[in-house]
Image (spheres, coloured by chain):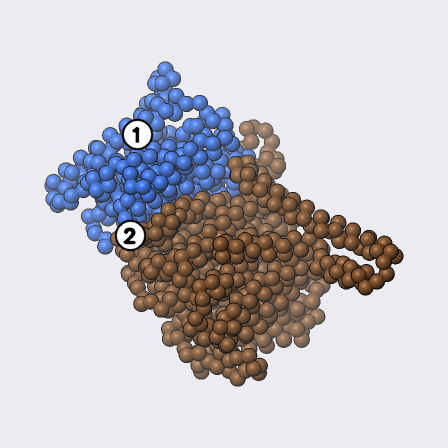
Chain colours: A blue, B brown
């Protein structure tokens, strides 16, 4: 089941996403600055931040346990694994032999589990409150994601992301009403999970002191930030893999043409992510914040859309 | 020696352990060491017999019966063997743990605890292997009694007495229903043997009746909503070692009962049975986890979380029964496989978490999460093992809870592809509910772990705690390693469980695993490789390590400061997020459900006080009537009055009423 070339494509995907994630996040910072009529930090600022943080001394509260210390590593590792499983450059999932979309959803849960515990581990007020919010949002959002993905899996007849992505890319699953609705609900869910407005402000300096990140410093903070940038790109990649896998490699050749088509797919993927980030940035900056405890009012709508998509699937439209 | 004889040896040894403990009652140390060690050895012997039976199913063994009601036959088919294995594995861990744990009860009759624990395990072993309804009921009652005395161990506390009383009542109400369901079989077949029951030719209406009786009867024991309310008080009152056994394996004997009667004996041939089980499963899972989240007492949280997990197991059973009824053997296989896998996993992680809670209680004598905190530094091994249990219960890959929930999702998926419209529309919604429950149970696990082990110590005793003794650690370590192995070993365990299901359903065994992969019969539908995932996750941990080696500055080092940052103000322990405000967003958002619960409680209390007032009125009216008309009617009224009094003790009668109402509604629903 494991083919060598797919194994390397998987590793390539993981490393490429690792490498470019801070850039995409930098892009959204630039976008925000432009919309605020500021000059902004430049697209590569995040790399400079990360490298600088890596060289800084780390300050840890004595109350922090080993979960706090392990979290940055676990976050990066779980995001890398998701990046290797998702069909990003090819419409086949490179690490499909590890697991399916249920595993992908639960790998997010793995990183969230440690992220939240690390926030509570130090006894910090902001860390604890951030952890609480993070978990609460996941309670509201994860059912939406699973419902939509389940409908897509039913249409494809498999929970394997390869099958779903290939069938959407080759038009075997046309864009029924149910797919459109699902796409809408999933896009919203990704938007919330990326830590964007209306409920969260990932780069907030005044509010909640960046939540569970409060107590991280030095190299741990660098890794945590990197992990969060990756989480955002990986979420977009999941959305693209399920709903818009067009442009990724569907037919597998060998030698130079294969290399060329992979390179093309990488370029197409970058363009798609940039467009997604562009839309997200516009929405984010055009939106007011919603009071956190009112979040459910908005997410019920998303769950409603997801369930409606399932109803349309049942009715075959 | 024959496999079943080995099992009997194990049961006998538990008996020896029980009586030795009773004889040594009064001398604490010898009593607990004897009870613990003999229990450990007996569990080990039972395990040997389970392994032998797992390899080669032995033919049933008939012992001479002292009573004329039927054959005292012991059998170890696939299902019974699985349960025997579970009971012995947990028995092993708990017996080891008990050696030191029981030491904290210095002033009480420690021997009694060892006596009832060993007796309890022995009775559970007999319940799951006996193949005769009469003896099943006898052992079932003895198991209930042993567990009742375990709950009542600290009977000097008022809430313990109440909890024990409630437990006794529900257990007996359930037991009566089970008895009735067996009686229906007996009336048709004239025998108490399960083998005869299996051939019984019941009319559809009688089958429905037996199914409902068994579901409600065993459901009460398993903690199915709405018959769950005895569980949190009983679990928080009982000693932790006993409650670890009750939550992890006694519940599974009820699951075993449902599977034995509804699936094995009745054949699960009706579609709505499966849907009903699925419905109650979903209800228990969702309400269980929501109620767990707002509790403060760690053992009550675990009790509600057990209700949730029974819900997940029942959802699997429901899918399996739907599969049998709609003649889709694949769906049936995956559904029951998921249920059995989750039952096995749950016994490990729930046992582990209860033992962990017991360890905390052992050191700092509280069950309130708000009074713990900071134990991770003082009790590092307990913390680590509790975290493993937490990760497992939250279904975090690659731990065992994830693998069984993965199978549950796949069961829903397989069933969603069927023909029946109702099934097709409800299965995906159940999958969504499972996702919802999954996120909430992660929150519950985080609440327990961080409440007890993270942050600052919130009371003085918590600040001075130290690691628990080796015997307790080894008991927990056994279960923690089990949690990890049951996850990573999925490619070995899933085929074994599939074999058990195939044996129970009498269908040909199907492959569900190859190499390091597991899949839901159909390999195209989805694959999972827990071992490869674990290896990759560990391997990918190297990436950040390398990044730091390349870009980091080793001389920068790490500085440890006293307090977390508090915006430049002085840090106070009160600033940390405690267990009681952790769940606030959920409490606000799902306010409706909690309000419904308190409304239901108020209603029950109102019914209780109404009947109490009625009762008082009757008592007051009595002498008046006596004065006016001195004839036999007075005596009748007095007689009735006394009987109503006898029925009405405390507020338990409203629960009784509740059960009867539930049953009545179900019956009406059937015969409509």
Q: Residues within 10 Å of mark 2 (few under 14, many from 20)?
A: many
Which of the 4 image quarters holds residue B12? Answer: bottom right
Chain under disc 2: B
Q: Which residue is mark 2?
A: B525
On the picture, is B429 further left or further right than B19? left
Instruction: In the displayed orientation, state which residue is furthest to the top.
Output: A37
The numbered disc on residue B405 is: none
- Residue B109 appears at what percent x and percent y? 69, 67
- Say which residue appears at 78% left-offset and 51% top-offset: B617
Indicate which label's residue lies in the foreground, 1 or 2: 2
Q: SS for tag 2?
A: helix
Residue B161 vs residue A277, the one in the foreground: B161
Quarter placement of the N terminus of chain B: bottom left
Chain under disc 1: A
Establish whether labels 1 and 2 are both on one chain: no
Q: Residues within 10 Å of mark 1 (few under 14, many from 20)?
A: some
- Residue B238 appears at what percent x and percent y? 63, 59
Q: SS for tag 1?
A: helix
In the figure, B452 relative to A268: above or below? below
- Residue B615 appears at what percent x and percent y? 75, 53
Q: Cβ–Cβ below 8 Å for labels 1 and 2?
A: no
Residue A307 vs residue B381, the one in the foreground: A307
- Say which residue appears at 55% left-offset and 56% top-offset: B663
The answer to whether one can see residue B472 in this image is no
- Say which residue appears at 64% left-offset and 60% top-offset: B169
Q: Which residue is mark 1?
A: A276
- Residue B49 appears at what percent x and percent y? 45, 75
Residue B591 vs residue B100, the one in the foreground: B591
Residue A17 vs residue B200, the one in the foreground: B200
- Say which residue appears at 74% left-offset and 58% top-offset: B645
């Amino acid at each position: 089941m494991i083919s060598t070339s797919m194994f390397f494509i998987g590793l390539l995907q993981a490393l490429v996403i690792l490498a470019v994630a801070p850039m995409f996040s930098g892009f959204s910072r630039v976008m925000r600055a432009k919309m605020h009529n500021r000059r902004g930090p430049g697209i590569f600022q995040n790399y400079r931040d990360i490298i600088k943080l890596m060289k800084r001394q780390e300050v840890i509260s004595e109350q922090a346990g080993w979960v706090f210390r392990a979290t940055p590593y676990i976050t990066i590792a779980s995001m890398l694994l998701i990046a290797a499983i998702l069909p990003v450059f090819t419409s086949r999932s490179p690490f499909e032999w590890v697991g399916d979309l249920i595993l992908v959803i639960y790998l997010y849960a793995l990183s969230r589990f440690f992220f939240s515990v690390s926030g509570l581990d130090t006894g910090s007020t902001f860390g604890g409150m951030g952890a609480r919010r993070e978990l609460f949002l996941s309670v509201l959002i994860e059912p939406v994601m699973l419902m939509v993905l389940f409908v897509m899996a039913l249409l494809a007849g498999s929970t394997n992301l390869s099958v779903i992505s290939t069938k959407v890319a080759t038009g075997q699953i046309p864009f029924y009403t149910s797919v459109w609705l699902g796409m809408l609900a999933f896009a919203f869910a990704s938007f919330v999970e990326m830590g964007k407005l209306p409920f969260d402000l990932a780069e907030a300096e005044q509010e909640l002191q960046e939540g569970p990140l409060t107590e991280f410093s030095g190299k741990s903070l660098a890794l945590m930030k990197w992990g969060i940038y990756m989480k955002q790109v990986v979420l977009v990649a999941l959305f693209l893999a399920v709903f818009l896998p067009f442009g990724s490699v569907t037919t597998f050749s060998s030698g130079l043409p294969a290399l060329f088509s992979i390179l093309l797919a990488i370029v197409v993927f970058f363009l798609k992510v940039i467009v997604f980030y562009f839309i997200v940035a516009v929405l984010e900056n055009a939106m007011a914040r919603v009071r956190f405890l009112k979040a459910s009012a908005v997410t019920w709508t998303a769950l409603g859309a997801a369930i409606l998509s399932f109803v349309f699937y049942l009715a075959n439209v | 020696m024959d496999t079943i004889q080995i099992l009997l040896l194990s049961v006998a040894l538990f008996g020896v352990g029980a009586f030795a403990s009773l004889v040594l009652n009064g001398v604490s140390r010898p009593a607990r060491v004897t009870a613990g060690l003999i229990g450990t050895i007996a569990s080990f012997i039972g395990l040997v017999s389970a392994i032998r039976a797992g390899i080669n199913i032995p033919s049933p063994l008939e012992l001479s019966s002292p009573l004329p009601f039927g054959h005292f036959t012991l059998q170890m088919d696939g299902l019974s063997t699985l349960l025997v294995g579970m009971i012995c594995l947990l028995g092993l861990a708990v017996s080891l743990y008990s050696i030191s744990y029981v030491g904290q009860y210095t002033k009480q009759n420690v021997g009694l605890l060892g006596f009832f624990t060993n007796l309890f395990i022995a009775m559970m072993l007999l319940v799951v292997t006996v193949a005769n309804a009469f003896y099943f009921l006898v052992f079932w009652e003895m198991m209930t009694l042993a567990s009742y005395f375990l709950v009542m161990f600290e009977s000097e506390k008022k809430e313990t007495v109440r909890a024990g009383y409630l437990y006794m009542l529900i257990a007996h109400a359930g037991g009566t229903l089970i008895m009735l369901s067996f009686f229906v079989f007996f009336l048709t077949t004239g025998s108490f043997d399960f083998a005869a029951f299996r051939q019984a030719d019941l009319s559809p209406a009688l089958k429905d009746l037996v199914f409902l009786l068994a579901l409600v009867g065993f459901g009460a024991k398993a903690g199915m909503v709405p018959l769950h309310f005895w569980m949190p008080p009983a679990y928080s009152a009982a000693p932790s070692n006993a409650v670890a056994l009750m939550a992890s394996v006694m519940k599974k004997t009820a699951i075993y009962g449902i599977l034995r009667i509804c699936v094995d004996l009745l054949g699960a041939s009706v579609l709505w049975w499966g849907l009903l089980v699925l419905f109650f499963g979903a209800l228990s899972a969702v309400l269980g986890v929501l109620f767990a989240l707002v509790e403060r007492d760690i053992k009550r949280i675990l009790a509600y979380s057990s209700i949730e997990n029974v819900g997940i197991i029942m959802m699997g059973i429901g899918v399996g029964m739907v599969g049998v009824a709609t003649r889709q053997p694949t769906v049936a296989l995956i559904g029951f496989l998921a249920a059995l896998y989750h039952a096995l996993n749950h016994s490990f992680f729930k046992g582990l978490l209860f033992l962990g809670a017991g360890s905390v209680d052992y050191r700092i004598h509280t069950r309130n999460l708000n009074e713990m905190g900071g134990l991770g530094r003082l009790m590092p091994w307990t913390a680590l093992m509790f975290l493993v249990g937490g990760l497992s219960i939250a279904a975090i890959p690659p731990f065992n809870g994830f693998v069984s929930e993965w199978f549950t999702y796949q069961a829903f998926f397989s069933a969603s592809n069927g023909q029946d419209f109702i099934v097709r529309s409800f299965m995906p919604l159940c999958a969504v509910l499972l996702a919802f429950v999954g996120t909430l149970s992660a929150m519950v696990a985080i609440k327990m772990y961080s409440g007890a082990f993270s942050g600052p110590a919130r009371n003085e005793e918590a600040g001075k705690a130290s690691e628990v003794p080796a015997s307790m650690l080894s008991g927990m370590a056994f279960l923690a390693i089990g949690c990890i192995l049951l996850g990573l070993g999925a490619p070995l365990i899933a085929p074994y469980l599939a074999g058990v299901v195939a044996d129970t359903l009498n269908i040909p065994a199907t492959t569900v695993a190859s190499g390091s992969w597991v899949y839901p019969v159909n390999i195209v539908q989805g694959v999972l490789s827990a071992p490869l995932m674990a290896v990759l996750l560990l391997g990918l941990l190297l990436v950040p390590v390398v990044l730091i080696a390349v870009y980091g500055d080793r001389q920068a080092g790490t500085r440890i400061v006293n307090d977390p940052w508090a915006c430049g103000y002085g840090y106070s322990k009160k600033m940390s997020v405690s267990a009681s405000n952790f769940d606030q967003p959920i409490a606000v958002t799902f306010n409706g459900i909690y309000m419904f619960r308190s409304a239901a409680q108020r209603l029950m209390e109102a019914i209780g006080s109404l009947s109490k007032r009625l009762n008082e009125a009757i008592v007051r009216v009595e002498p008046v009537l006596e004065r006016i008309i001195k004839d036999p009617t007075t005596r009748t009224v007095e007689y009735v009055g006394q009987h109503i009094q006898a029925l009405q003790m405390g507020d338990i009668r409203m629960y009784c009423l509740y059960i009867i109402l539930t049953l009545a509604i179900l019956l009406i629903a059937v015969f409509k």
